[in-house]
């Protein structure tokens, strides 16, 4: 079949390549570009292990044709973990993952949630990660890790406010 | 899992271009919007198109806007976009509530309302809302544009009124002209990502009109007209709700499958009807459970 030339930004770097029409974005990321954080799990959009950011939103890369990524901005866990976020630190601290297969997807889904809603309820967190299946932990340590990150951010924000208030004292 | 079929990928920039490619390829063409159903079906061998037409490059299909008294939802509008729209939330709360139960965030970021009704699986969550609001499907073909009432759209399992060469460009949803309240009740095996075992949408309108539609309990989603006629003009009472529940077995035809038995679906449909009716009326009056809060 006629190959499709595509150009897209991957983790901040412009990439250009020819893909088969039937190639999924997941296959191209893993097998052609060596980006391995998105995993092949169910391969049907149910498990969330293949999650990537596509133009700033989480998407199932197993259900996106590579051809569709032309002109898009793709960010994977590799792209946001050079400088680990407070969320990642707290997930590590709480031993939120065991085998780690679901971890990239969970981190991206939770990151998407916290960007839009910095103070979600437990129910909202559960909904945000409902599409990311974890077969090891029973989810409790994942929820605890995310909640600890929210709390740490709130404490940090309060500290900054206090310091600013102290500075403005005569 | 690689996609086993070979196809040519097209990304037209205008509607006439898309229609031309679709008519040239007839039944061998597949329209790609969010792709969350199409790619699964191609991987499973249920569809093997020779031409895939990605319609996301057509600007007018991304429209989500009120024109006169109707909301136009373009073919490329995702469920996430619907959920983030204040117009949808305030004026079409039943559609908003249905949309929130579709799959998961990562799927809703790609999946479209129009794709949902084109897939036409029996359990599609958006159908009860569209049936209750009496929406119509806007279709463009090589010859003409036509508008099909949603009630005549679903013909059976994965079957719709579309003809080869045609493309759905959007859904037009008229805003009810009276005060109203809605409730979508979805039964899954667990909260979170699951397909509906039973779904019922209720739209209560001022003047004691109740529009009720079921999904996942028949080959195609449909309005429950016998129940609607029974309730029309009446305030809800315990006795009336019981009589409505007695009619449920005439309205729906559930089957037993891997997710639930026929008997369980029938039993739950009656309970869900009651809860949906009560919540829809309560919401119309300004109370009731918060929008998006499950009543089951």
Image (spheres, rainbow, N blue to C red):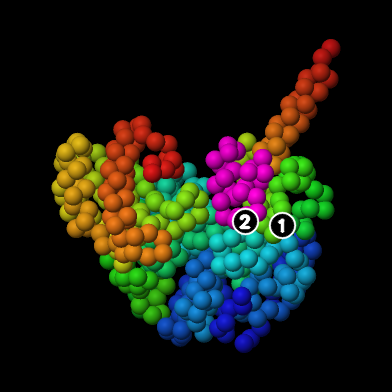
Residue B265: x, y in percent? 32, 56
Residue, x 61% and y 49% (percent of image)? A138
Quadrant location of the N terminus of chain B in the rendered image: bottom right
- Residue A101 position by quadrant: bottom right
Residue, x 61% and y 72% (percent of image)? A65
Let me know if residue B276 is in the magenta part: no
Q: Residues within 10 Å of mark 1 (few under 14, many from 20)?
A: few
Q: Give the labeled residue for mark 2.
A: A135
Viewer-proximal residue, B91 or A133? A133
Residue bounds of the magenta highlight: A120-144
CB-based contact (under 8 Å), mark 1 and mark 2? yes
Tell me the element at label 2. loop
Q: Residues within 10 Å of mark 2 (few under 14, many from 20)?
A: few
Residue B23: x, y in percent? 43, 82
Using the rendered image, report if marks 1 and 2 lie on a common chain: yes
The answer to whether residue A104 is visible is no
């Amino acid at each position: 079949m006629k190959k499709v030339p595509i150009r897209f930004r991957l983790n901040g770097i412009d990439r250009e390549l020819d893909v088969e029409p039937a190639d999924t974005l997941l296959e191209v990321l893993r097998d052609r570009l060596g980006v391995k954080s998105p995993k092949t799990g169910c391969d049907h959009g149910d498990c969330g292990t293949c999650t990537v950011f596509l133009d700033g939103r989480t998407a199932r890369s197993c259900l996106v044709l590579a051809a569709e990524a032309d002109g898009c901005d793709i960010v994977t866990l590799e792209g946001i973990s050079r400088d680990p976020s407070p969320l990642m630190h707290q997930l590590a601290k709480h031993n939120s993952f065991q085998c780690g297969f679901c971890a990239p997807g969970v981190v991206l889904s939770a990151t998407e949630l916290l960007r839009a809603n910095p103070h979600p309820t437990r129910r909202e967190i559960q909904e945000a990660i409902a599409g990311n299946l974890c077969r090891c932990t029973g989810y409790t340590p994942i929820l605890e890790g995310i909640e600890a990150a929210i709390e740490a951010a709130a404490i940090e924000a309060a500290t900054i406010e206090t310091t600013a208030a102290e500075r403005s004292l005569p | 899992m690689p996609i086993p079929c070979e196809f040519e990928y097209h990304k037209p920039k205008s509607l006439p271009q898309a229609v031309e490619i679709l008519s040239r390829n007839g039944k061998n063409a597949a329209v790609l919007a969010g792709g969350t159903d199409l790619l699964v079906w191609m991987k499973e061998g249920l569809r093997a198109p020779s031409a895939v037409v990605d319609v996301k490059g057509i600007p007018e299909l991304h429209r989500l806007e009120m024109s006169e008294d109707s909301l136009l939802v373009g073919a490329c509008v995702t469920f996430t976009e619907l959920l983030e729209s204040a117009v949808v939330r305030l004026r079409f709360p039943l559609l908003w509530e249905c949309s929130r139960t579709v799959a998961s965030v990562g799927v809703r970021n790609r999946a479209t309302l129009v794709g949902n009704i084109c897939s036409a699986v029996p359990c599609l969550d958006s159908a009860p809302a569209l049936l209750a609001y009496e929406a119509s499907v806007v279709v463009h073909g090589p010859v003409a544009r036509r508008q099909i009432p949603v009630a005549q759209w679903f013909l059976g399992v994965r079957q719709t009124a579309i003809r080869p060469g045609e493309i759905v460009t959007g859904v037009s949803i008229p805003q009810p002209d009276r005060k109203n309240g809605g409730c979508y009740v979805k039964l899954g095996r667990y909260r979170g990502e699951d397909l509906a075992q039973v779904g019922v949408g209720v739209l209560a309108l001022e003047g004691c009109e109740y529009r009720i539609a079921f999904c996942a309990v028949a080959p195609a989603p449909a309005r429950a007209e016998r129940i609607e006629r029974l309730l029309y003009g009446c305030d809800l009472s315990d006795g009336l709700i019981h009589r409505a529940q007695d009619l449920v077995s005439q309205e729906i035809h559930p089957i037993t499958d891997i997710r639930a038995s026929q008997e369980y679906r029938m039993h739950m449909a009656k309970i869900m009807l009651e809860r949906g009716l009560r919540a829809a009326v309560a919401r119309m009056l300004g109370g009731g459970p918060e929008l998006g809060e499950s009543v089951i």
